[in-house]
Image (tube, helix red, strand yellow):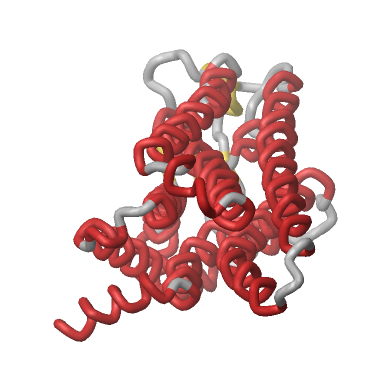
Amino acid sequence: MEAFNLTSSGLPTIILNGITGLEAAHIWISIPFSTFYIIILSGNFILLFVVSKEQTLHKPMFLLLCMLALTDIGMSTSVVPKALCIFWFGFKRITVDGCLTQMFFLYMFAVTHSAVLVIMAFDRYVAICDPLRYATILTNSRIVKLGLMGLIRAVLLILPLPLLLRRLPLYAKPVILHTYCEHIAVVKISLGDTRVNRTYGLVITVVNIGLDLILIGLSYGLIIRAVLRISSKEAHQKALNTCTAHICVMMMSYTPFLFTAVMQRFGQGNAAHVHILLANLHLLVPPMLNPIIYGIKTKELRDKVGKYTCRM
């Protein structure tokens, strides 16, 4: 079968088919996609603007919210603009380098997002279990360093994905049945031995998500143990309110991802459009709801947002 190699010159483009099976409805599907994306950009940029303007919000928790907002914007922007080009104009072609670049940034932001959730769990642990030392343990500079470590980890973990794919030849007319360059989808249009690529993709999922969930679970285990030692019901409620927003964001982030990952590898009998829609919603719904959840649950942030809103 005719093939081309990713390292050769004059490469043909890859076709992103969009939502396979629902091509006739692309225009209608673009309405919620574009609406969600506008809300994502608006909500997260408002959060970033308010935190940057208000000196009283220059605290570790709000720095973490800004990091979360940046990863949410990055993940959705890696995917949605190209998807809308497919839906609106039928621009399905993407260069090989463009495909690998999209893949890198999508997964890099996703892994960084997971790292931020781990740091936020540690932040909640210190706030509840060792509140008197909170200001000395979690300084702004330390939070920034932890965020940079999460970013570096993400780059080191994800960079091999496109590099490993570049060594493989692709089909002469490669078509990806998706709206974006998902790793396993690109592997499926590759010729040759893809065991290394599949194994490394699985290792990243298990090691990264597995390790992060273990660290988050450990933090909340210690939090629960500390809360149970407190006899006051009012203190129990206060501790629960402190963690509610993070728990909601964490559940929205990990549950769809794990469900999509399982369907991707073991749900071959499901309709293609179901998997594609779920994969896209995973990149749209949590980034849209995250600033709303924290805006509702965090009084200090809610008051500052209200102050700027009243000025408009």
**Residue 206 located left or right of residue 85:** right
On the image, which quarter does residue 239 sit in? bottom right
Residue 224 shows in the view = yes
Q: Residue at coordinates 78% horizontally, 56% vertically from top-left?
A: 225
Nearer the observer, 164 or 252: 252
**Please, is residue 71 above or below residue 167 in the view?**
below
Picture quarter with the C terminus:
bottom left
On the image, which quarter does residue 62 sit in? bottom left
Q: Residue at coordinates 47% horizontally, 30% vertically from top-left?
A: 149
Picture quarter with the N terminus:
top right
Residue 30 shows in the view = no
Q: Position of residue 148 (x, y in %)?
A: 42, 32
On the image, which quarter does residue 8 sit in? top left
Q: Count the marks: how many? A: 0
**Please, is residue 29 above or below residue 112 in the view?**
below
The residue at the far left in this view is 311
Nearer the observer, 283 or 179: 283
**Residue 275 located left or right of residue 140:** right
Q: Position of residue 109 (x, y in %)?
A: 47, 42
Q: Position of residue 231 (x, y in %)?
A: 76, 71
Q: Residue at coordinates 47% horizontally, 14% vertically from top-left?
A: 7
Q: Residue at coordinates 44% horizontally, 55% vertically from top-left?
A: 61
Q: Position of residue 79 (x, y in %)?
A: 45, 51
Nearer the observer, 27 or 232: 232
